Image: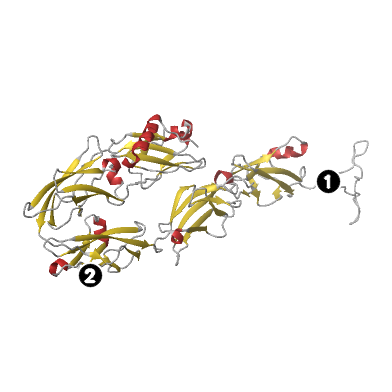
Amino acid sequence: MTSGITMEQRRAENRVGRGRSARCVVAVFLWSVASAQLRYSISEEVSEGTVVGNIAKDLGLDKNALKSRKYRVVSVAADHLFHLNENDGILYVSRKIDREEVCAQNSACLINLKTVLENPLEVHNVGVEVLDINDHTPSFPEKEKTLDISESVLPGARFQLKPARDPDSSSFSVQQYKLSQNEHFRLEVREKEDDGKIPILVLQKSLDREITRGISLVLTALDGGKPPKSGDMKIFVNVLDVNDNTPIFSKNAYSASLFENAPVGTTVIQVNATDMDDGQNGEVVYSFGNSVSNNIFNLFKIDQITGQITVKTPIDYEQKDKYEIEIQASDKGFAPLTTEKSVIIKIVDVNDNAPEIEVTSFSSSIPENSRPGTTVALISVNDLDSGLNGKVICSITEDVPFSLSPSLQDKMFSLVTKSPLDREKQAHYDLTITAKDAGQPPLSSEKTISVVVSDINDNSPEFSLSPYTFYITEGNDPGASVFSVKASDCDEGENALISYQIFRIGDEHNKIASFININPETGGIVALKSFDFERLKTFQFQVVATDSGAPSLSSNVTVNVFILDQNDNAPVILYPVSSNGSAEGVEEIPRNVNAGHLTSSLVR
């Protein structure tokens, strides 16, 4: 994908081609659901609030998307240098950036500025190129230097000096040296990988102490600025009498291997040199060369008498895997002669760094209807060790519906769902991610993240009984509660909030239901009239329970109601009536009737 780069950025890229070594380059690649790459350039010391670039515009992000999606910087290492406006996607400088401070440990100076656009997740890695300005002057570690040189030294002899230092980078660092005009010495400059340009005085005309006892020189260091800045060191050459043999090392080259974290005092290597002169002119002492940096003095020390190099402080392979040290062998003559030899020390990695796990993007809540393969989080792992010690295997808790899927980007994994989720069975997962390296013995680290399964309305209300059967004694009080129904829903929140209603249709059978009412919240049912067993002995109706989800789900149940009889009617005697209107079967009772005489029969 083509990066969104402004015209100013393209002009900066052209300048990169002409003077790349003068810059602190921040090189990062952007990865997200849709991969992209951005790079900006700014000069150091720009004012706070300076615009670096419009990330949203250069990525082609819709302005409306920024209103509904949160856009922010998640890089811990760079959040104090830059600020991202989450509303318009413009990247600003948070404070003045001193390139020499940011790049103090490494001239490559890589800053990972990682941004995240959420819902859905997009990770954008943005490269910011900090351009150096010439704000430092070259300076020598010594303002004055005295060299004791014997008159017997032949032309061609070389005297290495401590280089000048300039905190600026590349073309703005020390580019050349100049030596004041004289007839005895010329200047030679040697390039060294770690220490830059090393000035060397070369004797081009023999010294004669009887003619000249001392020579004053001025060595000037200039950087590549326009105009250049410079610094001076005064050199006084003291011409001494004859000590005509220099120490000679026993080997042409010295090298050694050293395990990182070796105990203090561990012997690394021992050098040896001899001098054919007699007396003090033949006694050899050892020291580090003038070009050795302060870092070497902090890590190693050399015995002046034996030439044994030992560990001064623990060595870390992850900081540097090889050291080249200049060793000097000097005699004790009145005009000491010195020979230099390089010692190469290779640091051997040990498995002393556990893998690091970083959750770059994370959705703590995921709907239960998410399809398998839905991304929950982006995980990055890193191990500072090398080789097998730095090879990391990442795994996740077993027996969970989640898995780790390797990303196209190295050492990146996606935490995804691997099977359907059901909140009603399990609503929360604590997922433990384990990263283990391949070292011996292996080191590992763990990180636990919590994932909440959010509810969807996938369960209908369920009645406690089906059907319901209730009995009502006739003569009930109208408006009084007679019975109730109850339904439950396995969902939660609005999805489980139930309301009740009576299902009413227009047929004759359900007209009775019009005399029944239900509380929509509790399911309590009241009779709006008093029932009479002699007129109605039983009836049925249906109740519908509906949840409040969107869309809502419902279920219904049949309610059977039986009316119970009460003794609320007195017996009635019925007589047949004749055609003339008199009661049949009624007769007068004679006065002399005996007891037990049948007078009439009753019809009930």
Of label 1 and label 2, which has the lower sequence position?
A: 2
566 in relation to 41, above or below: below
- Would residue 559 appear left or right of 167 to someone viewing this image? right
Q: Secondary structure at mark 2?
A: loop
How much space separates mark 1 and mark 2, taking CA atoms? Answer: 143 Å
**Foreground of the two, 335 or 288:** 335
**Foreground of the two, 94 or 227:** 227
Q: Residues within 10 Å of mark 1 (few under 14, many from 20)?
A: few
Residue ID for mark 2:
306
Q: Quadrant of residue 283?
A: bottom left
Q: Position of residue 460 (x, y in %)?
A: 64, 46
Res 573 label? 1
Q: Secondary structure at mark 1?
A: loop
216 in relation to 129, above or below: below
User: Going by the picture, which residue comes out furthest to the top?
Assistant: 7
At 48% from the left and 48% from the top, the residue drawn is 362
Q: Residues within 10 Å of mark 2 (few under 14, many from 20)?
A: some
User: Going by the picture, which residue comes out furthest to the left?
Assistant: 210
Q: Quadrant of residue 264?
A: bottom left
